[in-house]
Image: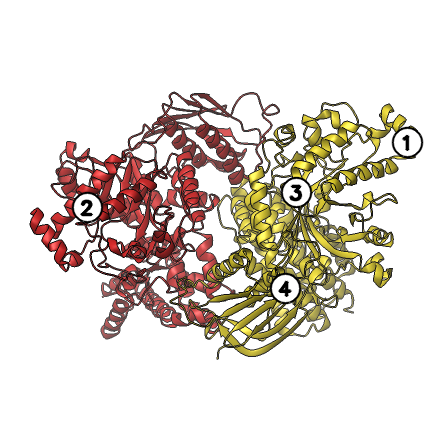
Chain colours: A red, B yellow
Amino acid sequence: MKKVKTMHSLMPLPIEMTLADKELVIDSEFRIELSGHVEPRLERAAMRLSERLAQITGISMHRDQSAAREDATLLIHVDEKVAEVQSATEDESYTLDITAKIAVLRSRKLYGALRGIETFVQLVRQSDYGFVVPAVRIKDRPRFPWRGLLIDVTRHWIPPAVIIRNLEAMASVKMNVLHWHLTDDQGFRIESYRYPKLHELGSDGLFYTQDDVREIVEFASDRGIRVLPEFDMPGHTSSWFVGYPDLASAPGPYRIERNWGGHEATMDPTREETYEFISNFLSEMVTLFPDLYVHVGGDEVSGKQWQGNPDILKFMVSEGIKDTRHLQAYFNCRLHGILNKLGREMVGWDPILHADLPEKSIVQSVRGQKWLAEAVCNGFQGVAGSEYYLDLLRPAEFHYGSDPFGAEAAELTTKQQSLIIGGEASMWTEFANAENIDSRIWPRAATVAERLWSSRNVTDVEDMYRRLAEVSRLLDWTGITHKSGPRRMLYRLTDYGSIKALSTLAEILRPSFDTRWENHDYTSLTPLNRLVDATVPDSEKVRRFSRMVEQFIADPSDIVLQDALETQLRVWLYNHVELEQDIQQSQLLTELGPLSETLTHVAEIGLQSLAVLTTGKRMVHTEWEKQMIQLKKATDPITEVVLLIVPDIQKLNKAVRTVR
Amino acid sequence: MKKVKTMHSLMPLPIEMTLADKELVIDSEFRIELSGHVEPRLERAAMRLSERLAQITGISMHRDQSAAREDATLLIHVDEKVAEVQSATEDESYTLDITAKIAVLRSRKLYGALRGIETFVQLVRQSDYGFVVPAVRIKDRPRFPWRGLLIDVTRHWIPPAVIIRNLEAMASVKMNVLHWHLTDDQGFRIESYRYPKLHELGSDGLFYTQDDVREIVEFASDRGIRVLPEFDMPGHTSSWFVGYPDLASAPGPYRIERNWGGHEATMDPTREETYEFISNFLSEMVTLFPDLYVHVGGDEVSGKQWQGNPDILKFMVSEGIKDTRHLQAYFNCRLHGILNKLGREMVGWDPILHADLPEKSIVQSVRGQKWLAEAVCNGFQGVAGSEYYLDLLRPAEFHYGSDPFGAEAAELTTKQQSLIIGGEASMWTEFANAENIDSRIWPRAATVAERLWSSRNVTDVEDMYRRLAEVSRLLDWTGITHKSGPRRMLYRLTDYGSIKALSTLAEILRPSFDTRWENHDYTSLTPLNRLVDATVPDSEKVRRFSRMVEQFIADPSDIVLQDALETQLRVWLYNHVELEQDIQQSQLLTELGPLSETLTHVAEIGLQSLAVLTTGKRMVHTEWEKQMIQLKKATDPITEVVLLIVPDIQKLNKAVRTVR
């Protein structure tokens, strides 16, 4: 027996699980049997499971069932039929019992079986007997019924194939809502037959055809994922007005906006024609989206256009609407009326919160947990959004540590908390495009998926990162390019030279979202082909280095640690010598000189601190102060990236002061 | 000015080209203008070009033409309309003139423009001004009009997405025929409404729907690629007979064959019902495939079933057919009659060659150049096939060195040679599946593409490999997984540990096709997840090492070379120490112990030889002999791979003898 893997790598972690020391072998004779209520979606899911096992293991699965083994390897039993349209509160519970002979997956409804299949896939591992799943008993169900991923397809165009592979990835971590941000100032990304100038003039030709949409909705449905379309109104609507300026509260012409931040374009909520248009448009859209909910946005309505329009001001006076906030509430009531006639309910960002908001509406937080708490205090259902903005490029542990019941929501009563039905990770695309969006969403979204599925007390960050690394590998097999994309980008950066030195630098960086956001030169046409675009927020390398530094400071006499730290610091010290050659060879690398040199300086200070700490020889105080200032400066972003090891070197530098 | 790239990396090499020392900048303002005869395929090609440039450069291309620069960056002019269906002899010539201000691509027909667009893409490179194409004048046209790639989708199932991305790759090196080997003993891979038991019982459910086929044919047509379907008859037909055993010459039942080599299943050419079936079936198929040609296979007809069937023997006597070869000719004449009624001509493998073969038939060589020569001597058009079997996993230079006019075809008259209309690279899939087929086809197929497009005197192997490396990078952007696939497989092999030591070994190996072919245990269910499956035939590493060894032997006093060789040999010497750890961790690596140890021994001999050659100290003759024997043994494949550095070490070892 070469190795026994006693740990599993499930993410999200199931509610209850018991592992046994046995294994069920997965080979080419693997066979699935379905029983109970078998619907075509379950059959297709079983087929996909075989294909995915074949992919992960490299073993062709026997298709000729008559020739395969008689007993099934995996029995899937579903008790009951589900309604045609997936609701926001489906039963997703399942049990999975695996022995050395057979695996049995049972669920009351289809959705539980779909979730259990993903658990099965995550259990696959290598052993001395080849590929196996461990013997296990799992009883599982989600903590929240609404576990979403928002993808903004407006700031940068995200082609259908990218959406498709992200749905596959969402399914693999049991997420069940694709929140599709389809329209904004920067683009109107869905085809409308009724109002063709919306997509024709509002998208630069980059939009989903209705066939694309149907395919995506069906693909999602097959995986138990609801598709929630967002048509952001009445603000964020510049792209609508390019073709239909009469909808706006101020005269046009309008153009597709190419820069970021708030724009003033706002629908005119006082004209009946506006509601006629919205009604016709939404009537068409609901034929494409079967979900009960439509997201109507409602964020960042500046009110400037309203205040500047005498007709609108007159309307407000005559209707007794005291301010623009109440005018938006009026608009939302009308919107709600339209949706209700179409058999739909609305979801909106927290600025829609208002006494007049129709009661079945769902409020999604965008300005912080405070607003989520506020929404449920007022009796609305709430979806946690603000803490899970993936585009801010914070490390996974940040999102992992944010609970829907946390911060301001912690003070709520149990009954109020029960109105918080889940959350959504959000991927806004000001600084992401089809090439690198996967690397911005994954694997971090998996930690949000776990936060929303698993028990609240599952909070071990170390174990999360361990499992996240395994999930990341699995995602690689689903076609997600979170690993291959940045790698290819590094090659482009070196003009297809060696990426060794550049990788050494890249793996200890994180992109600085704030620096970019503050740079108002950015538009949708700014190239995203720089190092910052190929850099991801979590660094396993730096996590390991931080641990070593901490241990070393606690015990500077540990020779093994001394050696390891010195070796690592020397790699960083000399990296610039190599990278400088590459910089000479590639125009795209030109900007990196100062950053790369900073790494050299920081590593040098680290080595000097190390020497002081190991030899006990004191450092001249002015020298130490100089270093401290240098390090402080090195914490600033350079070329929009942050050197992640600086805080660790600062710890070493600080420890030097204790040497007297 | 940091660097000047004086070389380009075009493949296939154009017929005429002149490079100038100027550059045209590619930025987000890049704009294409079309003129002359503009058909939708050209518009789509222009759109794709923008997208591909955006992909390669990471620069978003401006879609809003009104906002873009006034002058086009690239003007594409096509003179004339083309016929609806692409023929086998289209005009594909084009000229491409690039100055620092504008690029102008001109062609008589659409096809020339499509080829020129690919040249343009291959010209993109980085300079001090960002991404550019060099100023150049190109006049180009293909040497042969038929430049194909055969993909066998029967031995292993190759899903539609894999075909699609391979079409994209074919287009990028100007190949223009997808020869789609759709039926064989191991599978019937296309949906038939007329005879549904063909795909239902003959494919394990792994077949292309007619929608898939239409999509693929259209995708190919958009890229100027003809799709030539192959329905191999009368042999290689087991899968047909599972559902329709009456077609066979011997009673059933039949099953889908799962092992390789020839099978005896053969259609009964004496029954009218056979022709009625074929006629109905082909009538259905020609609605899917617009090409003039249908490939009817015709290879490896064993004749055993015919000789064992008294009715067939009686028929032969009554019709005066003297042997089975003539019976196959009779079958082919009938087949030709059916195809002609459908407005089609036939292509077949060289065994169809026979005095009675209808004159417009095309013969594709499978048994060697001799048969290609034989075909054209007999007045038929010929397509070179036998020298371009990619599945044999020979290095690129082998195929590159094989000319359609070479070997037995060299003796032909110019007029006879003119009947050789091109060639095809063939990818049979006994030992390849969806996971690794890309790495078996690419980048090597590009050298076949060059052989068939460029002048015969373009034969510089060094330069070919240099350009092939660049083509390989471009292919990476088209979605071809020839790089990412094997890399992922290495990770699977180490169970997601480090792949450092395994890569060091893998990059100096080539798979041994022969060893696998001789192993009759292989079936379509044998896992293809071993090191041999992740190994490719060409090793840049070994080519570099070979050059170093040659130079060193010529001048053993070269200290730089001594050092470099020693460093490299030491890496190999110690690799096993590291790999052994990985082997302990992964069951899939277990078999690799002996191979990895062999590398150690070979490297050790190399180091000893090096020492002798540099110090001049003689080696004991018996020791030398022992080493020679060890090296001889090391040339044998181990676990189905060949250690490519052995011949170089043998050269060093041999050189030792000269030290007296």
Q: Nearer the viewer, mark 3 or mark 4?
A: 4
Label 1 secondary element? helix
In this rendering, do the residues under marks 2 and 1 share a single chain? no
Which chain is indicated by disc 2?
A: A
Q: Which mark is residue B36?
A: none
Q: Residues within 10 Å of mark 2 (few under 14, many from 20)?
A: many
Residue nearest the observer in this picture, B121 or B487? B121
Res. A202 image quadrant? bottom left
Which chain is indicated by disc 1?
A: B
Kind of residue at badge 3: Phe
C-alpha distance separating marks 1 and 3: 42 Å
Decide if residue B534 is in sight here: no
Say which quadrant the C terminus of chain B sits in: bottom right
Kind of residue at badge 1: Glu
Kind of residue at badge 4: Met
Residue occupied by mark 1: B319
Residue occupied by mark 3: B431
Residue occupied by mark 4: B11
Which chain is indicated by disc 3?
A: B
Q: Which mark is residue A350?
A: 2
